[in-house]
Image (tube, rainbow, N blue to C red):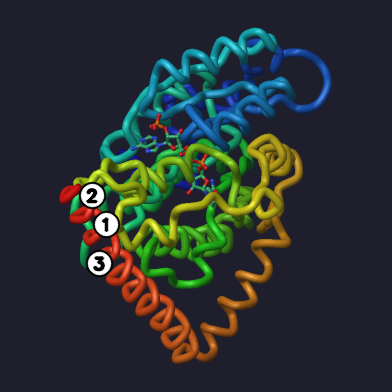
Amino acid sequence: MIRPSRIFQRPESGSHSGPESARRPVAGPASGEGPRRLRILVTGASAGLGAAIARELAARGHGLALTARRGDRLDDLAREVRALGGEPLVVPDDLADPEAPARIVAAAVGRFGGLDVLINNAGVGLPRYYAESDPEALRLQVAVNFTAPILLTRHALPHLVESRGTVINIGSAIGAVANPILGVYGATKAGLAYWNDALRREVGHRGVRVCLVDLGPVATEFFDAVRRRAGCDRVNPLGIDPPPDRLYNAMRDRPPAAMEASPAEAARRIARLVDRPRRRISPLRRVVWPVRVVGAILGLIPPLGDLAVGAMIRRVEREEAAGGEALRSRAVDRAAR
Ligand SMILES: NC(=O)c1ccc[n+]([C@@H]2O[C@H](COP(=O)([O-])OP(=O)(O)OC[C@H]3O[C@@H](n4cnc5c(N)ncnc54)[C@H](OP(=O)(O)O)[C@@H]3O)[C@@H](O)[C@H]2O)c1
């Protein structure tokens, strides 16, 4: 366990991270000449943005520790990284487990002898109105999106202080405007942004850079999972598609392509941060900035947000009631035939 008074001292001897090891080159292409090769831990590397970030960093020759639950996906990615000349470390683990952050950081530091960059990317969104949410789904979102980055960073911090390293937190534009369907997900991202700034102010003068990625929609499995969990792929007991689920209305469609970044495009922007850290970037500015402006206005005049969002929810409920009635009578007609 790291004691608070020791956090800005060098990590304890035997932790593989003394001053010598901090300068130790990482395995693979990272030991060659050229730009500084960094030791980087990426969470949520089995899919979507995390996998794209890992590919981008591997192509630049950095040393990678990759973590997520799906070990088979991580192994596939590790094969790709090896083909580029890297020697990645695969650490399958579940970030919902409060002990996982310590294990993951220890594995990465044990392998590399230190750490230069931590990318807190893993995230999960489980859309449901709060009152209808399974308590375990609520706990899971907070654990993976909020608690895990905080604990991972806490365990990594002595090593990042030593290497004058970087923390990159993957946030979401949704954190700017409270949205009841993704209320707890948005809260974790808003909390992450707050903590990101607090951490930056605390450790900046120790040479640790802290960056927030304010993300708009990216074409990953995230939306497939959101749709599935919203009930869109659920078999309707009436045998009618679409199901009369009020979330269906809100979650049916992916955002239009022009409103979505590709994972590779977003990953390129994020990968640049390891060499040139910035306080905050918005890879999809045309989407993120309007959301931020609306968020700022609603923050100044909260009743406006209550009116607008309240009206939207009442409309969806009216449509659901009407749609549900229509669907039920169609089912009855069909059964009568
Ligand atoms: N896609 C978007 O439009 C969008 C927009 C704004 C912000 N974001 C944020 O961007 C980040 C990446 O999302 P994505 O779009 O790439 O989503 P994704 O394709 O669904 O990938 C999510 C990653 O998180 C990992 N993960 C989920 N639960 C985990 C757990 N309990 N333990 C360990 N790892 C876990 C998943 O791996 P396993 O399932 O193998 O564990 C997967 O690698 C997230 O923080 C998300 O909130 C995404």
Mark found first going from the N terminus, 3 or 1: 3
Residue in the picture at 25% in, 50% down:
137
- Residue occupied by mark 3: 325
Which structural element holds mark 2? helix
Q: Nearer the viewer, mark 3 or mark 2?
A: 2
- Residue occupied by mark 1: 330
Image x and y of residue 162, in percent: 57, 38
Q: Amino acid at mark 1?
A: Arg
The residue lying furthest to the right in this view is 34
247 relative to 242, above or below: below
Q: CA distance from mark 3 to mark 2?
A: 14 Å
Q: 250 or 8: which is nearer to us?
A: 250
Q: Which mark is residue 334?
A: 2
Q: Is residue 16 left or right of residue 3?
A: right
Q: Amino acid at mark 3?
A: Glu
Q: CA distance from mark 1 to mark 2?
A: 6 Å
Which structural element holds mark 1? helix
Mark 1: give few (<14), some (14-19) or many (20+) Cα within 10 Å: some
Residue in the picture at 39% in, 82% down:
310
Mark 3: give few (<14), some (14-19) or many (20+) Cα within 10 Å: few
Q: Which mark is residue 222?
A: none
